[in-house]
Amino acid sequence: MKSNLNNQLNETLAKLEQVADGIDLHKNDPGFLIANEGESLRALKTQLEDARQEYVTSENAARIKHDVYMVKLKESEESLTKLSSIITGLYGKRNQVIADFGLLPYKKPGRNGSSKTNGEATQPSS
């Protein structure tokens, strides 16, 4: 959990406890209308602590799942790279058959297979 959220949580928990203690201290004062709120504040504090613990547990579980996901993704990419190399080696890097495997065959440079015509660079036509 981020530092500012931890600070906010700790401050809220402390305030809940402090207000509940104050209510307990003054609940017998004449005209004190919130005498029964101390226990509900303590229950709210407990619920907040439980929710935080569930959040931390879920966050840790999500982090573990993410790590597993990243390992599987890396394994998949490595496998694809290896198989792409094998397919390209088998058929050749310019063979159009490798497109059937989702690979892009190398194209000859230039419009007609070379980047220069008669020793000069070709000009793009407008």
Image (cartoon, grey):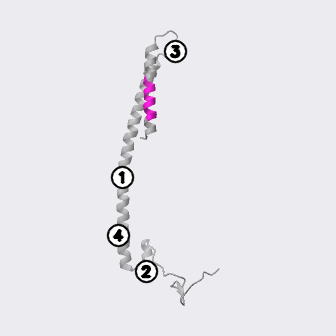
Alpha-carbon distance for marks 3 and 2?
86 Å
Q: Is residue 112 magenta?
A: no
Q: Return the residue at label 3.
A: 33
Tell me the mark number nearer the camera, choosing from 4 and 2.
4
Image coordinates of residue 29 in percent, x first then y, are 48, 10
Q: Which residue is mark 1?
A: 67
Callout 3 touching callout 2 (CB < 8 Å): no
Residue type marked 3: Leu
Q: Earlier in the sequence, mark 2 or mark 1?
A: 1
- For the residue marked with disc 1, what is the amino acid? Asp
Residue 23 percent across, percent down from the top left: 46, 17
In which quadrant will I find the C terminus? bottom right
Q: Closer to the camera, 68 or 117?
A: 117
CB contact under 8 Å: marks 4 and 2? no
The image position of residue 121, as x and y in percent, is 56, 84
Q: Nearer the viewer, mark 2 or mark 1?
A: 1
The range drawn in magenta is: 7-17
Looking at the image, the residue that sits furthest to the top is: 30
Where, by quadrant of the figure, is residue 58 drawn?
A: top left
Q: How many numbered discs sit on the rendered protein? A: 4
- Say which element carries label 2: loop
- Specify the amino acid type for callout 2: Asn
Q: Residue at x 41, y 36 (%)?
A: 52
Query: What residue is rendered at 36% in x and 60% in y?
Result: 74
Residue under pointer 4 = 82
As shown in the figure, which amino acid type bears the numbered disc 4?
A: Lys
Residue that label 2 marks: 95
